[in-house]
Image: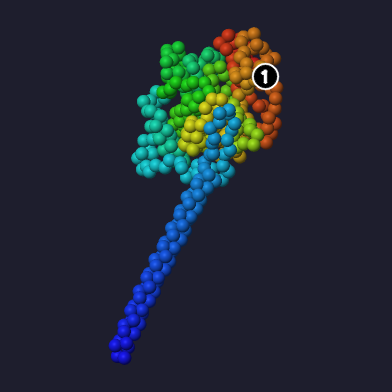
Amino acid sequence: MTMENNKDQQSITSYLKFFIAKLYSRNFFAFNLAFCCCCLLVGITLTFCAKTFSFNIQLQQLQNPPLIFNEPSHFSPPPISSNNSTKSHYQNNQTKFSINENSLEDYSKIPMVTHDMNDDELFRRTSLISMIHEPPFNQTPKIAFMFLTKGPVLLAPFWEKFFKGNEGMYSIYIHPSPSFNQTVYNERSVFHGRRIPSKEVKWGETSMIEAERRLLANALLDFSNQRFVLLSESCIPLFNFSTIYTYLMNSNETFVEANEIKNSQWKKGSQWFQIDRYLGLHIVSDKTYFSMFKKYCNTPCYSDEHYLPTFISNEFGKRNSNRTLTWVDWSKGGPHPSSFTGKDVTTEFLERLRFGSTCEHNGRTSICHLFARKFTPHALDILVRYAPKLMQFN
């Protein structure tokens, strides 16, 4: 009986051990299973959060870029982000420098036009000058006449008559082809020694707007320059100096033509602008729009027709008149406007350019154009003989 009881106890004990082992094994398996499930859930959650975070970052980048460009096979202007987001990005990305009073005094000195600064040094110096809110000396406000040319100013003798007697009220800057020989101007010419360091410019390429910005940067180094006019070698003035000076200096607006492009914040207009110093400083300091146009605006997109109209319209539209003061004839169509020779230049023709249309200026009806193009060298003799009397030069 005792042996049977011992056997039963051993059997019960063995069964209990077996049951406990099984139970532990199942609990261990369940614990591992639960732990694995928890890890899996944590992993899924983290992956989802990471993807969501990444998506949010990309979404934010898409919602708040300076410009959204899609490189077109056939030119179709891409959309631009809203003005507020663009302005915020534009203002936050302007180059900032820390300079002391001695540096400001050094930078306020007007350098020679024929300086040896490269583009980076030139634009850095211009950016520093923009920090000087008050001119370092008393000045007579001047107009900077900036000539973007292939070679010489073709109608230089006519311009000489226009400038005569108005010394100290204008500055001249010329950006010709680097291969051009400057000796065409004699030492008494107002164009002598007014050539800036230039680079090759190709029609329809971004080198055109690079040259415009280079001209502006050079002209901005002179604190006296308050108005800036971009001209070609084939441009002429339509009025005498005092009329043009008064019109520009008293204007409440700038003159950059900016025509609407359907369903787009891109604009298109004439490259021949007339702007003030405030706008000029922002143009040469711009990195956002300029870099995007340089990267994406390729033929058949022409930067000189789109860059400034788009930049000015989106960032400084309230200051701009959305028109140019330079008359051009596009009536014949084609990639280039009409040219005019001596037989085209008559009193009636010039009067039509001067008073043939009216525009709003400072809230009143006024003349629309101060300059005109394109006039060939064959028109020079007629212009020099008759136009100064008509336009009352001197």
Q: Is residue 51 above or below residue 194?
A: below
Q: Amino acid at mark 1?
A: Ser
At x 42%, y 15%, the residue is 179
Q: Is residue 384 above or below residue 285?
A: above
Q: Residue 231 versus residue 51: which sits nearer the camera?
A: 51
Q: Residue 188 versus residue 196: which sits nearer the camera?
A: 196
Q: Residue 49 versus residue 32: which sits nearer the camera?
A: 32
Q: Residue 317 versus residue 165: which sits nearer the camera?
A: 317
At x 67%, y 27%, the residue is 367
Write down the residue under mark 1.
331
At x 32%, y 87%, the residue is 4
Expressed as whole percent of the image width and height from the top left, the position of residue 70 reads 54, 35
Q: Is residue 211 above or below residue 132?
A: above
Expressed as whole percent of the image width and height from the top left, the position of residue 293 reads 51, 32
Q: Few, some or many C-alpha atoms within 10 Å of disc 1 (few <14, some 14-19, many ≥20)?
A: few
Question: Is residue 85 rendered to the left or right of residue 106?
Answer: right
Q: How is the image coloured?
A: rainbow
Q: Is residue 291 above or below residue 177?
A: below
Describe the element under mark 1 as helix, strand or loop. Answer: loop
Expressed as whole percent of the image width and height from the top left, the position of residue 73 reads 56, 28
At x 52%, y 47%, the residue is 59
Question: Is residue 3 rendered to the left or right of residue 179?
Answer: left
State whether residue 149 appears in this view. yes
Q: Residue furthest bottom?
A: 1
State whether residue 161 appears in this view. no
